[in-house]
Every structure is written in structure tokens, then in C-alpha cells.
């Protein structure tokens, strides 16, 4: 007979006690009041996730690890998330336009509703459920109210896709007929294969959600394997790394947008020279790879 044993939850601790736990595991704290202030604003559970890089298997900190080192990586991660959201926004808006334009001109204003216009009927049904949920959450938006009152709740694809998430856009693209996927690739991303685009969109969705919900991206792999473009094969990139997804972002971006963003990324790296960039998949020649 299996006996289910319930382990008691740990009791709550004060910020001072939390810091004592860290110092008891070998963390060096140079400014105790600063450390307590950081813990009071960032949540012990969230903050100590950055400590994983600097611990051994016995849950002890590597010799010489300071609280300031952890905080540096915490702040770097925060600023990198903000920077990534900045460049993901125009990519998402552009892709909404690409999808709605293709569907509208190939299949009509309500072409997104017909399963015959897509590869898989079950996946299309899932899209329709996502769309109805998103429309239901957007009832206070004036353009949704307008189509509900004037057109009886009928939404052309260029309006409907404005309400859905990037994840839904990603799944919709992956369910396009091959000829339609190729058309978008050739029209807007001529140096990329349509299967690469589908892979990048999926990874970009995961990244965007992490950034939007303030989740850690430092020292964290993605569950998806990004398709590495052939011109980067020799770089031996990690397909599940943040850097691999950033490569995809490069191909999604206009040259002007990318160049401006890369300057900001370099500035961030220079601001935090002590950060372990290998923990987000960056190679020593990362800037040259992103500049080519």
C-alpha cells in the first residue's frame, strides 16, 4: 500500500533571516543593509534563482561569491528583458500585418474562419477557440465594440488578429498551407526558410511571455529547439539558448531597427562586464555574429 506523506511547508522568514540563510551558505555580504533592502523589494525566491549559477551541488556558494555579484546579474536580467520587449513589439505588429494581409487577399475578409484554408482542421478549431477567448477579453476596446454593434459580431481578419496573442499568431502561421507560409517567407523574410520562421516564432513567443511576466531569462534554457540558420552552423550555437532566439530576432527585424537595438545591447553588456554571458548562450564573438 502506498502511503502518501505530506511534507510541511517551510515557515516564513524575515528579510534578516533570509540574508542569514545566504551567508550561512557561504555568500559574502559587503553591505548588509543594502542586501536587506534588495530582498525587501525583489522576493527571496525570485532573487535566489540567480544564485544557481554560483553554487555547488552541496548548495554552497563558490568561494568569493558576493551578494553584489548576484544583484548585478539580477539587474542585468531585468534590463535585458526590457530591451528584448522593445524589439519584439515591432516584430509582433509586423507579423500580424503579414498574416492578416495574406489571409484577406488569398481567402477573403473572413478567410481565417474557414478550416479549408489551413492544413489541419483540429488546429484550426483550436485557433477559433483562442480567437473567441481573445475577442471576449477585448469587449471594452472601441474597435471590438464597433464591429459587435455595426456588423453583428463579425470581424474581418485584419481586425480579428489584432486581438490575439503572439502565441496564437505563431500557431496560426504553423498551420498555414505550405504555399502560404512560403509566400510570407519570400515576401518579407527572403533570406529565411519558412520552417525557420515557424521555429523562431515559437521561441519568440516563449521569450516574450517570460519578459512580459518578469520571469528570469538568465541561465535558463528554452523548451523549444530553435532552427539555426545555415550561415551560423559553424558557430556551434545552443538551439535552446537565449542567444539562438536573438539570432531569429535579427532576421525578423528591419536593418535599421536591428542596428539601433544592437547598439543598445552592446551598451548593456558594457555596463555589466562581469556578467556570465555564456549562461545565456552568448559566444565570445557574439557581437560579430549579430553584426554580420
Image (cartoon, helix red, strand yellow):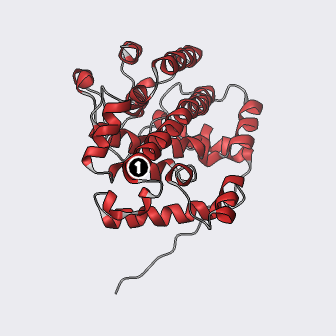
Question: Is residue 217 something one can see in this rendering?
Answer: no
Residue closest to the eye, 253 or 57: 253
Residue at 35%, 38% in the rendered image = 184
SS at mark 1? helix
The residue under label 1 is 103
Locate residue 286, reporting x and y percent.
39, 18
Question: Is residue 195 something one can see in this rendering?
Answer: yes
In the picture, measured across the screen, residue 175 lies left or right of residue 206, that is left
In the picture, measured across the screen, residue 92 lies left or right of residue 21, that is left
From this view, report whether residue 112 is shown above or below residue 29.
below
The image quadrant that residue 89 belongs to is top right
Locate residue 199, reporting x and y percent.
33, 42
Locate residue 38, reporting x and y percent.
71, 36
The image quadrant that residue 214 belongs to is top right
Q: Quadrant of the C terminus?
A: top left
Count of all numbered marks drawn on residues in the image: 1
Residue closest to the eye, 259 or 188: 188
Tell me the crowding category of disc 1: few under 14, some 14 to 19, or many 20 or more residues within 10 angstroms, Cα based: some
Locate residue 50, reporting x and y percent.
54, 37
Q: Quadrant of the N terminus?
A: bottom left
Residue at 29%, 62% in the rendered image = 120
Considering every residue shown, the one lying at the far bottom of the view is: 1
Residue closest to the eye, 152 or 57: 152
Amino acid at each position: 500500500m502506498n502511503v502518501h506523506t505530506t511534507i510541511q511547508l517551510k515557515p516564513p522568514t524575515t528579510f534578516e533571516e533570509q540574508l542569514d540563510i545566504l551567508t550561512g551558505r557561504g555568500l559574502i555580504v559587503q553591505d548588509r543593509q543594502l542586501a536587506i533592502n534588495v530582498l525587501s523589494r525583489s522576493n527571496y525566491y525570485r532573487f535566489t534563482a540567480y544564485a544557481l549559477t554560483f553554487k555547488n551541488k552541496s548548495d554552497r556558494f563558490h568561494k568569493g561569491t558576493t551578494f553584489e555579484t548576484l544583484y548585478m546579474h539580477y539587474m542585468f536580467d531585468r534590463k535585458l528583458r526590457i530591451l528584448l520587449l522593445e524589439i519584439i513589439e515591432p516584430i509582433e505588429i509586423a507579423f500580424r500585418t503579414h498574416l492578416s494581409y495574406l489571409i484577406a487577399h488569398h481567402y477573403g475578409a473572413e478567410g481565417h474562419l474557414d478550416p479549408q484554408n489551413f492544413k489541419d482542421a483540429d488546429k484550426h478549431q483550436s485557433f477559433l477557440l483562442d480567437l473567441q477567448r481573445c475577442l471576449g477579453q477585448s469587449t471594452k476596446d472601441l474597435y471590438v465594440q464597433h464591429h459587435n454593434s455595426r456588423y453583428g459580431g463579425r470581424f474581418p481578419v485584419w481586425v480579428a488578429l489584432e486581438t490575439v496573442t503572439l502565441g496564437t499568431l505563431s500557431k496560426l502561421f504553423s498551420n498555414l498551407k505550405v504555399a502560404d507560409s512560403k509566400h510570407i517567407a519570400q515576401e518579407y523574410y527572403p533570406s529565411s526558410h519558412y520552417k525557420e520562421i515557424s521555429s523562431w516564432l515559437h521561441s519568440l513567443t516563449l521569450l516574450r511571455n517570460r519578459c512580459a511576466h518578469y520571469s528570469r531569462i538568465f541561465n535558463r534554457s528554452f523548451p523549444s529547439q530553435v532552427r539555426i540558420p545555415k550561415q551560423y552552423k559553424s558557430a556551434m550555437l545552443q538551439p535552446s539558448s537565449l542567444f539562438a532566439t536573438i539570432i531569429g530576432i535579427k532576421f525578423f527585424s528591419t536593418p535599421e531597427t536591428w542596428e539601433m537595438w544592437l547598439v543598445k545591447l552592446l551598451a548593456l553588456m558594457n555596463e555589466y562586464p562581469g556578467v556570465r554571458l555564456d549562461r545565456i548562450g552568448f559566444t565570445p564573438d557574439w557581437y560579430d555574429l549579430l553584426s554580420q
